[in-house]
Image (tube, rainbow, N blue to C red):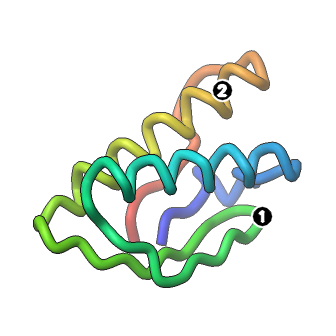
């Protein structure tokens, strides 16, 4: 699970959710991983992944990092979006 920093919403609009899912799909293909389930809440998300190549940290870094850049750019802000992995 990754949670929004300070409990803030990380998915305000449907466009946010779609961007996140597009990034997730791209990373699953790139790293040969499988996403069995996901749940996107307003201020956090849950993923159920299988990573045959033991590259979960690369996937999460890519997902959170790229989504953070999208989120901050569309809101003209800077800083952390995610509190971290729990």
Q: Quadrant of the C terminus?
A: bottom left
- Residue 6 percent across, percent down from the top left: 63, 53
Which residue reaches farthest left? 53
Residues at marks 1 and 2, CA–CA distance in whole angstroms: 16 Å
Tag shown at residue 58: none
Q: Residue at x 86, y 52 (%)?
A: 14
- Residue 3 percent across, percent down from the top left: 56, 62
| Of 29 and 51, the residue lying toward us | 29
Alpha-carbon neighbours of circle 1 within 10 Å: few (<14), some, or many (≥20)?
some
Q: Residue at x 65, y 77 (%)?
A: 39
- Residue 48 percent across, percent down from the top left: 43, 81
Q: Residue at x 60, y 48 (%)?
A: 22
Q: Which residue is mark 1?
A: 42
Element type at mark 1: loop
Which residue reaches farthest right? 13
Alpha-carbon neighbours of circle 2 within 10 Å: few (<14), some, or many (≥20)?
some
Q: Which residue is mark 2?
A: 72
Q: Residue at x 66, y 26 (%)?
A: 72
- Residue 35 percent across, percent down from the top left: 44, 74
In the image: residue 83, left or right of residue 43 = left
Mark 1 or mark 2: whose residue is earlier in sequence = 1
Element type at mark 2: helix
């Amino acid at each position: 699970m990754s949670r929004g920093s300070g409990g803030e919403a990380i998915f305000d609009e449907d466009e946010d959710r779609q961007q996140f899912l597009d990034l997730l799909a791209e990373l699953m293909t790139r790293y040969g991983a499988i996403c069995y389930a996901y749940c996107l809440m307003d201020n956090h998300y849950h993923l159920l992944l299988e990573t045959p190549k033991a590259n979960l940290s690369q996937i999460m870094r890519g997902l959170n990092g790229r989504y953070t850049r999208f989120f901050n750019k569309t809101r003209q802000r800077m800083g952390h979006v995610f509190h971290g992995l729990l």
